[in-house]
Amino acid sequence: MQESKEPLIRTAGLKKSFGDNMVLDGIDVEIFEGEKVVVIGPSGSGKSTFLRCLNRLETPTGGAVYFQGKELTQDTDLEEYRRQMGMVFQHFNLFPHLTVLKNVTLAAVDARLRERKKLKLKTPKKQIVAEEKARAMKLLARIGLEDKADAYPSTLSGGQKQRIAIVRALAVGPKVMLFDEPTSALDPEMVGEVLSLMKELADEGMTMIVVTHEMRFAREVSTRVLFMDGGKIVADGPPQEIFGAPKDDRLKSFLAKVL
Amino acid sequence: MLYLLNAKTLAERFRSAFLVDNRWQLYFQGLGNTLLISLFAVTIGVFLGFIFAMIVYTHSKTGKLKVLSFLSNLYVTVIRGTPVVLQLFIMYFIVLVSVKNGIVVGAVTFGLNSAAYVAEVARAGLSSIDEGQMEAGRSLGLSYAKTMLKIILPQAIRNIIPALFNEFIALVKETSVAGYVGILELGKVPGLIQSRTFDYLFPLLFASVLYLAVVYSLTLVEKCIEKALSRSDRNAGIKITGGRKKCRKAKSL
Ligand SMILES: Nc1ncnc2c1ncn2[C@@H]1O[C@H](COP(=O)(O)OP(=O)(O)OP(=O)(O)O)[C@@H](O)[C@H]1O
Ligand SMILES: [Mg+2]
């Protein structure tokens, strides 16, 4: 069924090096709509760099990335492109000088205003702001934090911050969500609330690529696991296979350490 | 000492320092010019300084703007490496020799001078912001410029308010060298009056008091700006407007 479909994201020989340090050494992968991909691997294996090459926070030094069949080139409108890819960071990276509501609406309003300019629409700015606010409030209500709309990030717990960061990324209307160790900086008691929000997203059909050390999440939520080592994808398969019957030796020794 | 405290002499000296020929007006004329030069200079300094800082910062982060960044660094090095008096002479006698208005020459000189110092302060402020902020902005589809303007700059400015005000205060006092090229600013007034009364006591005292009042007002403004900005660091929930009200009070003082 999926064979006939075009992958949402495809990389071909994707390479990234920092100086002499080859961090991604030829990544070929196809990710289809609706897949929940978990990326695991030892520290320094290039997991973060892989995600960051997908949304062009890093410029690859070789190979190509295709999004919905179109190759990313010099001419790609990166701002437009990045709005299709939400990214959630380990350290949340909320904007501390803005209220929670403003954190969520800032990029969405900006996107609408750019669209208005491009299409020469006549929608008043006020209306756009009001609409985006309403949408943001709905998103905040969904995670039970609408009462924090006017609060500043410094007053929130880590779990609240990360859930708001997720909502902030969703507000721009992405087709795929990238998570880079979203629970690694959290106190243990707050990991659950973030993972369950991510699970909800997964259940709604959001395409997700998640770098994580949460093996339970990988087993229960993912449809596919990528194991990276030394800048390469060493193993790629459904979680049952990766965790249940690992073939690769490096994968076996990695799992022995983390499980 | 006794001579100093002699009431009759003191009254006489006071009269000649302030009242004779309406000399008190000179102090305020000088103060006005000092404020005018400082205000224009700060405006020029902040505007150019931030531009230089953003150029250097952008180069350090993205590798772009190589030539502009080199020029900015060169500018900062040269300006900071030479005395402001010489810069003033260069402006007054060479570069802006055709400009008749001393205030303009002063404003431009001190503005260009201040830009170098502001640039250093602002650059430090920009690099104090966590890299994750730019990445978050970009990952949300904001352009580099938008992220800079809406996310990095506001936070950077907030971090450097104290250093910026130090620079403003230094600048106000530094404009007193403009007297060297005949601009009637506050620092020149005591000498001017002394040349007529042969008495420095009250002119120096009063000019100092006026400088102090200006500098002190600046620190008050700084305090209330800091207060207004710190509202996001405190308290859960509601925006606090108290900082702003205090500012209004401080201004009316
Ligand atoms: N901006 C950079 N400049 C230089 N080297 C970098 C940069 N970013 C990453 N690296 C290097 O790339 C390698 C892989 O980094 P990456 O962050 O992708 O690994 P990771 O798999 O995410 O590891 P971790 O589990 O520790 O997060 C590391 O050796 C790191 O030092
Ligand atoms: Mg990483």
Image (spheres, coloured by chain):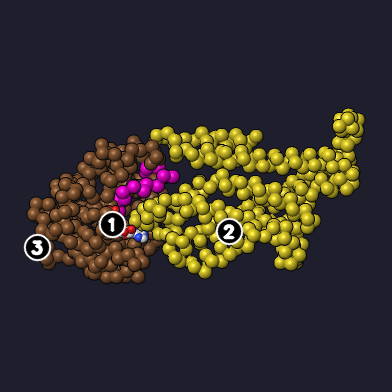
Chain colours: A brown, B yellow
Quadrant of the image containing the N terminus of chain A: bottom left
Q: Nearer the viewer, residue B212 or A103?
A: B212
Helix, strand or loop under label 3? loop
Question: Along the polypeptide, which appears first: circle 1 or circle 3?
Answer: 3
Chain bearing mark 1: A
Quick check: B81 left or right of B246?
Answer: right
Q: Amino acid at mark 2?
A: Leu
Residue B236 falls left or right of residue A24: right
Q: Amino acid at mark 1?
A: Gly
Q: Which residue is mark 2?
A: B48
Mark 1: which secondary structure?
Answer: loop
| Residue A181: x %, y % from top left | 27, 50
Q: Are the residues under marks 1 and 2 on the same chain?
A: no
Magenta span: chief secondary structure: loop
Magenta region includes residue A99: yes
**Bounds of the magenta segment:** A87-101
Instruction: Identify the mark at residue A44; answer none if there is no mark.
Output: 1
Locate residue B248: give its quadrant. top right
Q: Quadrant of ligand 2?
A: bottom left
The crowd level at tag 3 (other Cα within 10 Å; few <14, some 14-19, many 20+) is few
Q: CA distance from mark 1 to mark 3?
A: 36 Å
